[in-house]
Amino acid sequence: MRKPIIAGNWKMNKTAAECRELVTALVPKVKDAKCDVVICVPFTDIALAAELTKGSNIKVGAQNVAWADSGAFTGEISAAMLAEAGAEYVVIGHSERRQYFGETDKTVNARLTQALKYGLKPILCVGEKLEEREGGMTERVCATQVEGAFEGVSAADAEKVVIAYEPVWAIGTGKTATDEQADETIGYIRSVVEKLYGKNTADGMRIQYGGSMNAKNVDGLMAKPQVDGGLIGGASLKADDFAYIVMAAK
Ligand code: PGA
């Protein structure tokens, strides 16, 4: 049995003052959640979010991590810095990073390896673009991204990773994958993990759906056997919306 995990991806939203307001409202609303609850916040909100969620069931995550320990990497942030600030999770390889900031399967692999080295739990994002789905390339794209990300990663470390299947065409567009598309592709991704690490690791790995997941579609998606939760963008920015999704994940 895999415990579902619902993670908010705030992206570049919420100043510290806004973070305080949202987290303070969220804590009591999700205290009886049956799933793991994570909020992946901007770097400048991590320490504050960690303080505000202390003693609650909400864990804090970051949205990126450098592949090096420290040094001349202007604009990057290290795993040690994130861990010390109170992050337990980190989103790696989000399609927006791949699309706008030159993230590749190689850099995703390097960041994932580094996160694991420092005890951060990666939420690894994979997913196809619209033209790739329409061209029948979904499985090949997802397999390449998963295989690339896990290159050189041991089975023991792989088990600490959460995968988020996020079809790029569904992110921020209001267009959700159908329950069947999500279930089918996540099942396929699980088969790729099985090929890499065997059935036990694949059966235990939590694979979320992400892309316009909201209060209206959460029940249908969560009812699917392969869907182990969600990575929630827009709908994680309001306490009521996010809490509804969290409480629907059992
Ligand atoms: P969305 O974003 O829920 O706003 O589509 C999801 C994501 O990008 O992780």
Image (cartoon, rainbow, N blue to C red):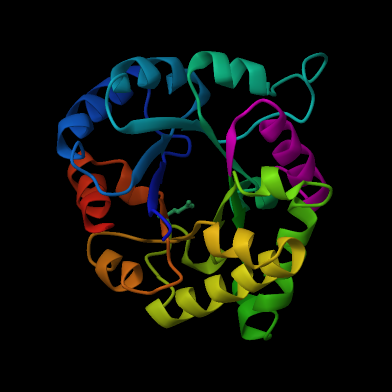
Nearest the eye: 18 or 109: 109
Can residue 214 be seen in this snapshot? yes
Q: Is residue 24 left or right of residue 112?
A: left
In this view, the residue farthest toward the front is 200
Image side of residue 31 versus residue 41, left or right = left
x, y percent for residue 43: 52, 23
73 or 67: nearer the viewer: 67
For the record, the magenta segment spans: 101-122
- 120 in the magenta segment: yes
* Residue 28 image position (x, y, % from top left): 15, 32
Above or below residue 166? Residue 131 is: below
Instruction: Name the foreground residue: 7 vs 133.
Output: 7
Instruction: Note whether 59 is above or below 200 in the view shown.
Output: above
The answer to whether residue 113 is left or right of residue 166 is right
| Residue at (29, 24) in percent of width and height | 18
Taking 198 as reference, is 42 above or below it?
Answer: above
Residue 92 part of the magenta-drawn span = no
